[in-house]
Amino acid sequence: MSAAIETEDLTRSFASGVAVDRVSLRLERGRVLALLGPNGAGKTTTVRLLNGVLRADAGRARVLGFDPTTEGDEVRRRTGVLTEGAGLDDRLTTRENLEFTARLRGLGRRQARSRVDEMLERFGMAERADDLTQGFSTGQRKRVALARALLHDPEVLFLDEPTSGLDPAGTRDVIELIQGLASEGRTIVLATHFLGEAGRLADEMAVLHRGRLRAFGPPGVLAKGIWDGVAAHLELGAPAEPDTVAALGAVPGVLEAQAAPDGARLRVRDRDVVPRVVAALVGREIPVYGASTHAPTLEDVYFEIERRILAETGDTSLIDGFSDRYRGLDA
Amino acid sequence: MSTGPDREPVRERRTPLGHGPTRVLGVDWEAVRTVMRKDVTAVRRSKPIVLPMLLVPLVLILALPVSVGLMAANAPTDAVAGALSSPMLRTLAEPILELPERERLVVLVLGYLLSPLLLVIPLMVSAVLAADAFAGEKERRTLETLLHLPVPDRDLFLAKVLGAFLPAVVITWASSLGYLVVANAVAWPTLGRLFLPFAQWTVMIVWVAPAVGLLALGLLVIVSSRARTTQEANQLGGAVILPLIFLAAAQASALLLAPVPAVLATGGLTWLFAVALVALSARRFTRDRMATTA
């Protein structure tokens, strides 16, 4: 069976410059991919290319085995899209907006109506079905737009900034909705610059920077490629003294040690090293109030990748090497 | 590792709801109808669009024929003879000069001078609707959503064009019918008979007016593809459409005095230009272009 999404050297330029530059990736079905990057990184353009709205200048793409350039309608029949701006026609009611989409997706009149009712119920908008969408809150608009994206039960979902403009409660609701969709086995591409939501949802992450794919793979795999060992934190009640830091560095299995505002930050070979570290401090009569290991989050991975890109932007060959080194495909 | 939920890839293939398109002559007419219906519903609820589309026809079919027609009915009977005294105009205006003197001015004003203004209606309506259908989608940020749906570019274009063209034709014909009734009613005390429609008038309304509407539509579609807002499209379009309105209104008076085959030929030429313009617009209407100018 073909991958959900596969691209090879996908490239697209505009008058303003290259928006997507030789992007190659492969996403298996049922996975959630966080497409990350700052504004202008090429996330939305990538989604448009994958859904056949834009044509690639070079390279190729396959979505569920179809070529978006030559079989765009076949791709779009199987994908659902939540655009950043929701894209509701405010002169229509919620139901009219949804039924319009359902009919264009080939649902018969009766089937469209019952499916719209079902989706409005599911997304908690049934009571607003016959209201014009003008005046809806951002959260309500996102809900209607998500319902619309799911009308035809698509296998692949492209969600472009699904939580932008939402308050914390709205953000939580939408993330829970997306988690529900992911648990149904859909392939989801989440283009976002909100790393918290990406961390909660994504199986894989792709970091775009000025159109180039700088990293791609499961966050855990990428983290292992970036950092050796495991991060640990010791709570000592005060910053570790220099001789304490030196003693910590001498414990076998400690790769790195430095003072922190309330103790010390370590990088250890594995979590089994932590008890030895605590024992060493107790042996020196230094009180230890707490010790914990800390697995890097997607956010940690992203910012480390961004930091390295920025540090290396003077030397593009280094960036290219960096990109190759951290590709999840190679891991 | 706290990064990401641990999910096994799902192997079964989902079948999307909804059938593939049923095409007749290569067009998914159901999709075309759906887009048209949506556009018409949305436009009906938009006061800035509905008001001019109601007011202009009302002025043309009611206010003008009643006021100007009544003035003409009560004007001195020799006024028109002087106006049509040149040899060329005398030949063209033969149908008017053949009438009894007291009928000439009423027929001239209601039949030949005000009637051509009906051509303003298809121009205006199709231009307003086209601006809303193309530039308006960009302005409302609904275009992107539309482009992500499984409707071929050509069907989308056809739906947008027909959604502006057919209402323009219906409104023009309905307004012309209204004008027919009002003009005959105003002229009745003077003429004592129905003077509209005559052959050239009928050809102008049935054959030329839709062509003029399509011509305006073709121009507006080209303009709208560059504009980002309806206002911008209307402003740009106005620069193109206004001269066309003056041209149409000015030339149509002579057209109504010309032989029927000449009116038919003029309509045919207009259709040719209009279809060529729309075909040119259709070639330029691609998802890629729409998305990059949105």
Image (cartoon, coloured by chain):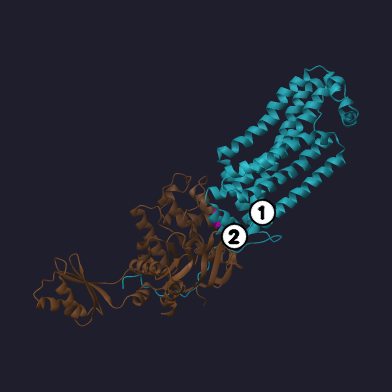
Chain colours: A brown, B cyan
- Pick the front one: B189 or A146: A146
Tell me, yes or no, whether the highlighted magenta stretch contains residue A80.
no
Task: Choose top left, top right, bottom left or bottom right for residue B87.
Answer: top right
Q: Residue at x 45, y 57 (%)?
A: A146
The residue pinned by badge 2 equals B288
Task: Choose top left, top right, bottom left or bottom right for residue A256.
Answer: bottom left
Question: Does dot 1 land on a helix, a strand or a loop?
Answer: helix
The residue pinned by badge 1 equals B158
Question: Does dot 2 land on a helix, a strand or a loop?
Answer: helix
Q: Label 1: few (<14), some or many (≥20) within 10 Å?
A: many
Image quadrant for the C terminus of chain A? bottom left
Tell me, yes or no, whether the highlighted magenta stretch contains residue A102.
yes
| Position above or below: A276 against A136 | below
Q: Position of residue A247 (x, y in %)?
A: 16, 77
Question: Which stretch is magenta?
Answer: A100-105
Q: Are marks 1 and 2 on the same chain?
A: yes
- Pick the front one: A301 or B20: A301
Alpha-carbon span between mark 1 and mark 2:
17 Å
Q: Residue at x 51, y 65 (%)?
A: A46
